[in-house]
């Protein structure tokens, strides 16, 4: 049986870079049929773009009400499905990823944040944490040198203590991965 993997990490933990590398390894090096899914809630780009300058096309834009299982089933014979920004999936869509691996025997690798800028779980990430066959942490470091586990949002000249869960870093908003101690110092636990 194929497996569902959830690779989680803070901002700047190389999740997108790994997705693009995995797509290359499977699709180009090993000649596997791979598609990339991305929630359309992320308006940054219709591509997967890594901060180090590589990118990959998105094959299916996932709207809030899309049946991901049906969409993948209708996409033809596939070996793997890669999911960018999986934290923005609904919990129902996270379950559909498990069905893709289990019932369609297609490998699913999802990448996403675990926690939002206000220390709340993202719906999609929370469900993936609960049901994925494999869960891997992509570590990145806080400015103090500790492993970062929190994501802080900086906008309008200050650290944000509340706001919308989704605010894409289009230039007006910045995110910083912090350890919980530094998060407490800047934002407050
Ligand atoms: Zn720190």
Image: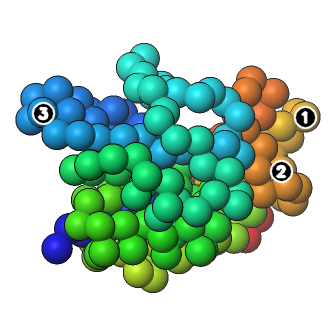
- Judge from the rendering whether residue 183 lies leftward or rightward of residue 127; answer left or right: right
| Residue ID for mark 2 | 160
| Residues at circles 2 and 1 in contact by the CB criterion of under 8 Å | yes
50 lies above or below 77: above
Q: Going by the image, does 8 lie left or right of 183?
A: left
Tag in front: 1 or 3: 3
| Label 2 crowd bin: few (<14), some (14–19), many (20+), radius 10 Å | some
Label 2 lies in ligand 1 vicinity (Cβ under 8 Å): no
Instruction: Left or right? Give the position of 51 relative to 18.
Output: right
Q: Nearer the viewer, residue 35 or 86?
A: 35
Residue at screen point 29% across, 75% down: 102
SS state under label 1: loop
Residue at 39% from the left image edge and 20% from the top image edge: 54
Q: How far apart, in angstroms, are the residues tagged by discs 1 and 3?
A: 47 Å
Residue 29 spot, x, y in % from top left: 10, 29
Residue at position x 73%, y 27% in the image: 170
Q: Earlier in the sequence, mark 1 or mark 3?
A: 3
Q: In the image shown, does 61 or 15 lie closer to the viewer?
A: 61
Q: CA distance from mark 2 to mark 3?
A: 45 Å
How many numbered marks does the figure carry?
3
Residue 117 image position (x, y, % from top left): 71, 56
Q: Secondary structure at mark 3?
A: loop
Which residue, given by chain and number where applicable, does mark 1 sit on?
156
Q: Quadrant of residue 108?
A: bottom left
Alpha carbon of mark 2 to alpha carbon of mark 1: how far?
Answer: 9 Å
First-in-chain label (2 vs 3): 3
- Residue 99, quarter of picture: bottom left
In the figure, 78 relative to 179: above or below?
above
What scheme was used to colour the molecule? rainbow
Residue that mark 3 sits on: 31
């Amino acid at each position: 049986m194929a497996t569902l993997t959830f690779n989680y990490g803070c901002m700047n933990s190389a999740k997108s870079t790994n997705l693009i590398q995995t797509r290359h390894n499977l699709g180009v090096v090993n000649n596997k049929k791979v598609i990339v899914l991305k929630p359309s809630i992320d308006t940054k780009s219709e591509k997967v773009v890594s901060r180090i300058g590589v990118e990959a096309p998105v094959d299916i834009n996932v709207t809030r009400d899309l049946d991901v299982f049906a969409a993948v089933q209708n996409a033809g014979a596939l070996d793997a499905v890669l999911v960018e920004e999986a934290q923005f999936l609904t919990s129902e869509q996270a379950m559909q990823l498990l069905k893709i691996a289990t019932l369609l025997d297609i490998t699913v690798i999802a990448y996403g944040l675990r926690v939002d800028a206000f220390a709340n779980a993202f719906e999609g990430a929370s469900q993936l944490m609960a049901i994925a066959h494999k869960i891997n942490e992509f570590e990145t470091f806080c400015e103090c040198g500790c492993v970062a586990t929190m994501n802080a949002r900086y906008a309008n000249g200050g650290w944000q203590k509340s706001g919308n869960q989704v605010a894409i870093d289009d230039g007006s908003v910045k995110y910083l991965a912090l350890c919980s101690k530094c998060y407490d110092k800047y934002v407050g636990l």
